[in-house]
Image: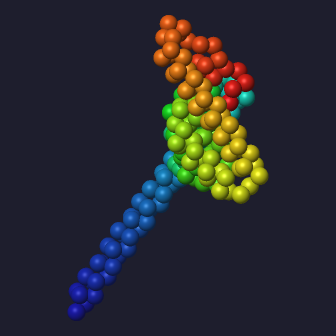
Amino acid sequence: MLSEVYEEAFKMRKSRGSTSAVLVALFVIASVAVSGYLVLETIKNRNYDCGVKSLEAEDFVAAREYFIKANKYSLRPKEEILDALAECYAATGESAEAKSCYEKLISLDPHNMEYRYELGRICIANKDYKAAEQQIRILRGMKNPQAEDYADELTGSMQTGMVKGIFKDFLKKLAPALGDIPGLSDTPEKGDN
């Protein structure tokens, strides 16, 4: 009987030792995870700050690279990073990437009028009028004067783009030797939106 008590005491002592080891291991794992998180946040913040400075200096290529890194080190999509990244993509002519960023931003904040407006502008520039119409419809459904203004501006741009496209196609069929016609090129001129 006494030997049974010793055996039970030994088992309890042994299990307490393993419990302590498990607790220490969990503490170490938690500490490493927190340290890793802090390192990622530091890298993300440093890249974001450098991106903002580059964006203010209108160095869109450098800003884009910093924002790509900041987004990479972000554990969740951050609106401010994606918004700045979309602006850089749009400024460097990378409309597919800008469109993707605005779509992600809209998924994060579906009621943001500016994101929908910018997405609509990109769709119009890419001659994706169906997608632009969808953004116009959503903006009008917001029942907000600013959203209505955005919808009106997109509608005007879309109509202008469609007319230019029809006229350009007509002239190309009529006189293919004319080449590129000033004012009707696919690249936006200064002042065009």
Work out whether residue 35 or residue 173 is closer to the camera in this orientation and state it: 173
> Is residue 7 positioned above or below 80 on the image?
below
Looking at the picture, how far across and down is residue 101, in whole percent?
55, 40
Establish if 56 lies above or below 104. above
Q: Position of residue 16 (x, y in %)?
A: 38, 74
Kindly indicate the quadrant of the structure image that contains residue 121: top right
Considering depth in this image, is 40 or 84 the residue closer to the camera? 84
Instruction: Please give the name of the residue rendered at 77% of the width and 52% of the height, measured from the top-left corner.
Output: 145
As displayed, is residue 167 above or below residue 16?
A: above
Asked whether 165 or 128 is in front, the reply is 165
Which residue is located at x 56 percent, y 48 percent?
134
Say if 122 sits above or below 175 in the image: below
Q: Position of residue 111 (x, y in %)?
A: 64, 55
Q: Classify residue 55 as left or right of residue 145.
A: left
Task: Please tell me which residue is depicted at 48% across the width and 11% down the height of the picture.
Answer: 176
User: In the current view of this chain or complex, which residue is farthest to the front?
Assistant: 174
Q: Quadrant of the N terminus?
A: bottom left
For the image, the number of numbered tags is 0
Q: Quadrant of the C terminus?
A: top right
Viewer-closest of 168 and 75: 168
Given the current orientation, which residue lies at the most extreme top position? 177
Q: Residue furthest bottom?
A: 1
Q: Is residue 51 visible to the viewer in this orientation of the structure?
A: no
Q: How is the image coloured?
A: rainbow
Residue under the image location 43 percent in, 66 percent down? 23
Q: Position of residue 192 (x, y in %)?
A: 69, 26
Could you tell me if residue 15 is visible in this image?
A: yes
